[in-house]
Image (tube, rainbow, N blue to C red):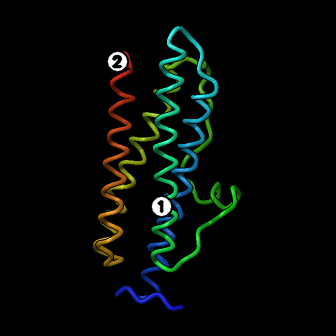
Amino acid sequence: MKTEIGIGEKLRQEAAHVLSRLLADEVVIQMKTKSAHWNIEGIDFYEKHVFFANQASEIETVIDSVAERIRHLGKFVPGTLQALMELTHFHEKTPEKNDSQSFMTELLNDHQSLIIKLRGIIIRSNSEFLDQGTADFITMLMQKHEKMAWMLRAHLNN
């Protein structure tokens, strides 16, 4: 059935592509967070093991919501790791050490990079795609990433 939501086909396609790139970024940052959860070592192991598990769970919820937003626009979601790796702006990187400071620094940098990207998507959603629903959705995601970044930042000894 045809998607009639007040946004033309071309604009919905462009918005869905931007969301697909975001989905890919979310999958990579979630995997990096799971890696931290699995591989953390040190005196603070248990506390950080639980912390990373909680953040990974939050991101899992975000991933599902981004995929659903793409479907709201009447488009299909990229469903293979290969497709997602071609869309992401992140690079897989493993910290040199498996301590909390190394993992948290890497993840904080990723969240901050993603927050900046999300701000751009909000602007594009409003001005180019004429899609207030996606702009509002992305604003909510940005706030979640801002909170996760704050939590990571609060743990770092800088």
N-terminal label among 2 and 1: 1
Q: Nearer the viewer, residue 61 or 149?
A: 61
Q: On screen, 149 above or below 158?
A: below
Q: Are marks 2 and 1 in contact (CB under 8 Å)?
A: no
Q: Please report the residue visible at 47 percent of the width from the left and 40 percent of the height from the top.
A: 110
The crowding category of the residue bearing disc 2, from other C-alpha atoms within 10 Å (few below 14, some 14 to 19, many at least 20), is few
Q: Please report the residue visible at 59 percent of the width from the left and 44 percent of the height from the top.
A: 91
Image quarter for residue 97? top right
Query: Which label belongs to residue 102?
Result: none
Horizontal and vertical percent for residue 32? 58, 37
The Cα atoms of the two marked residues, 2 and 1, are separated by: 33 Å
Q: On screen, 22 above or below 75?
A: above
Query: Which label belongs to residue 158?
Result: 2
Horizontal and vertical percent for residue 123? 29, 65
Q: Please report the residue visible at 49 percent of the width from the left and 72 percent of the height from the top.
A: 16
Horizontal and vertical percent for residue 150? 32, 33
Q: Please report the residue visible at 47 percent of the width from the left and 27 percent of the height from the top.
A: 51
Q: Nearer the viewer, residue 7 or 105?
A: 7
Q: Amino acid at mark 2?
A: Asn
Horizontal and vertical percent for residue 102? 52, 22
- As drawn, the residue found furthest toward the top would be 43
In the picture provided, is 31 more to the left or to the right than 119?
right
Residue at label 1? 66
Secondary structure, mark 1, is: helix
Q: Amino acid at mark 1?
A: Val
Quadrant into which the N terminus falls: bottom right
